[in-house]
Image (tube, grey):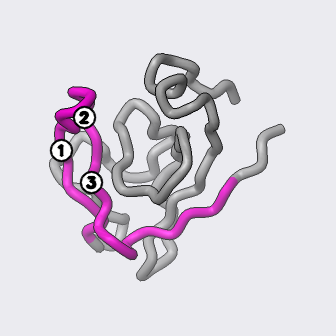
Amino acid sequence: MKFKNDKFRKTRGGYTRLLKISCEKCDSSICLYQKDGPGNLRRMYIDRIIDPAVSISRKDLSCSKGHQLGVKIIYQKEKRPAFRIFVDSVTKKVIKGK
């Protein structure tokens, strides 16, 4: 799998990793996500979501069992659509690259 290498990744220092995102409550898989830069996962940009197991076209992000994980926003600083993730609603696991 190739990582996206664009101006947003370069702005955050070029550091990236692949995360497996799951629901904290029921442990159901949500998606794979390319996280650029250091720090916590506060929002998930729509263009970085890979292989979603749930619908990302709705205005909220929910797992397959209905637990609400975040809401859709437009991140004003970069004018990018994203999901603002609720605190402690998801678990993240770093997937090693091949």
List the residue tagged with mark 3: 84
Closest to the observer: 3 or 42? 42
Question: Is 17 part of what is drawn in magenta?
Answer: no
Label 2, on which residue?
Answer: 81
Return the residue nearer the eye: 36 or 92. Answer: 36
Tell me if mark 2 has few (under 14), some (14-19) or many (20+) residues whose alpha carbon lies within 10 angstroms of its own: some
Looking at the image, residue 34 sits to the left or right of residue 43; the answer is: right
Q: CA distance from mark 3 to mark 2?
A: 10 Å
Instruction: Give the left or right position of residue 76, taking residue 52 as reference.
Output: left
| Residue farthest toward the bottom in the current orientation of the protein | 25
Q: Amino acid at mark 3?
A: Arg
Q: Secondary structure at mark 1?
A: strand
Q: Residue furthest top?
A: 6
Q: From which residue to which does the magenta span run?
A: 68-94
Q: 32 left or right of 78?
A: right
Q: How many marks?
A: 3
- Is the C-beta separation of discs 3 and 2 under 8 Å? no
Q: Identify which residue is drawn at 20% across, 55% down.
A: 71
Q: Position of residue 83 (x, y in %)?
A: 28, 49
Q: Element under label 2?
A: strand
Image quadrant in which you'd find residue 26:
bottom left
Name the residue that disc number 1 marks: 73
Q: Are marks 1 and 3 in contact (CB under 8 Å)?
A: yes
Q: Image quadrant for the C terminus?
A: top right
In whole angstroms, how far apart are the C-alphas of marks 1 and 3?
A: 7 Å
Residue 38 in percent (x, y) is at 55, 48
Q: The N terminus is located in which quarter?
A: top right
Check the image and name the residue furthest to the right. 98
67 left or right of 95 in image: left
